[in-house]
């Protein structure tokens, strides 16, 4: 069961990173939006690294707060980040 949860977490994390990279390539981003997206990408990479080594520390949760502050729950990135956060919390 844990292995399938780790696999799901890795999948959602990679997909989230892809969406963040796509948003970073959009020309209409403000400087603050670019900084926020870069921080999110770095955070997601840390989560993916923990998941890849099955070393979930529990210190990287809280992605859902980012969604509340930045996106609606029904946005693609918002939904992905909520899934990442939920799976991460379940593995701690």
Image (cartoon, rainbow, N blue to C red):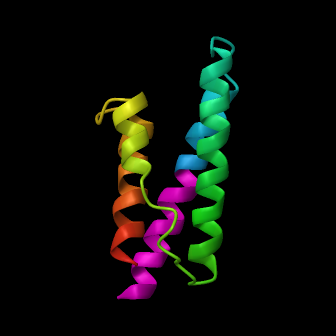
Of the pair 6 and 89, the residue shown nearer to us: 89
Identity of the residue drawn at 42% across and 54% down: 62
**Residue at point 70% right, 26% down?**
25
Residue 65 is one of the magenta-drawn residues = no
Which residues make up the magenta segment? 1-15
Vertical side of 14 occupied by 56: above or below: below
Q: Is the magenta stretch mostly helix, strand or loop?
A: helix
Looking at the rendering, in which quadrant would you find the N terminus?
Answer: bottom left
Q: Residue furthest left?
A: 74
Image x and y of residue 9, in percent: 47, 67
Instruction: Give residue 41's position: percent from left, percent from top.
Output: 63, 46
Where does the C terminus fall, quadrant-wise?
bottom left
Q: In which quarter of the image is residue 34?
A: top right
Percent x, y of residue 78 = 39, 39
For the image, the number of numbered tags is: 0
**Which quadrant would residue 53 be assigned to in this image?**
bottom right
Q: Is residue 48 above or below residue 27?
A: below
Lateral position of residue 25 relative to residue 63, left or right: right
In the image, what residue occupies the spot 32% across and 30% down? Answer: 72
Quick one: 69 or 24, which is closer to the camera?
Answer: 69
Task: Give the residue displayed 36% in from the left and 56% down from the top.
Answer: 83
Q: Tell me: 26 left or right of 9.
A: right
Q: Residue furthest front?
A: 59
Residue 15 rendering spot, x and y as whole percentages: 54, 51
Asked if the stretch drawn in magenta spans residue 11, the answer is: yes
């Amino acid at each position: 069961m844990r292995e399938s949860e780790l696999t799901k977490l890795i999948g959602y994390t990679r997909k989230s990173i892809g969406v963040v990279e796509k948003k970073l390539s959009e020309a209409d981003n403000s400087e603050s939006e670019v900084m926020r997206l870069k921080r999110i990408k770095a955070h997601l990479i840390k989560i993916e690294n923990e998941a890849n080594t099955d070393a979930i520390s529990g210190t990287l949760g809280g992605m859902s707060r980012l969604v509340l502050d930045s996106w609606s729950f029904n946005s693609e990135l918002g939904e992905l980040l909520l899934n990442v956060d939920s799976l991460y919390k379940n593995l701690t």
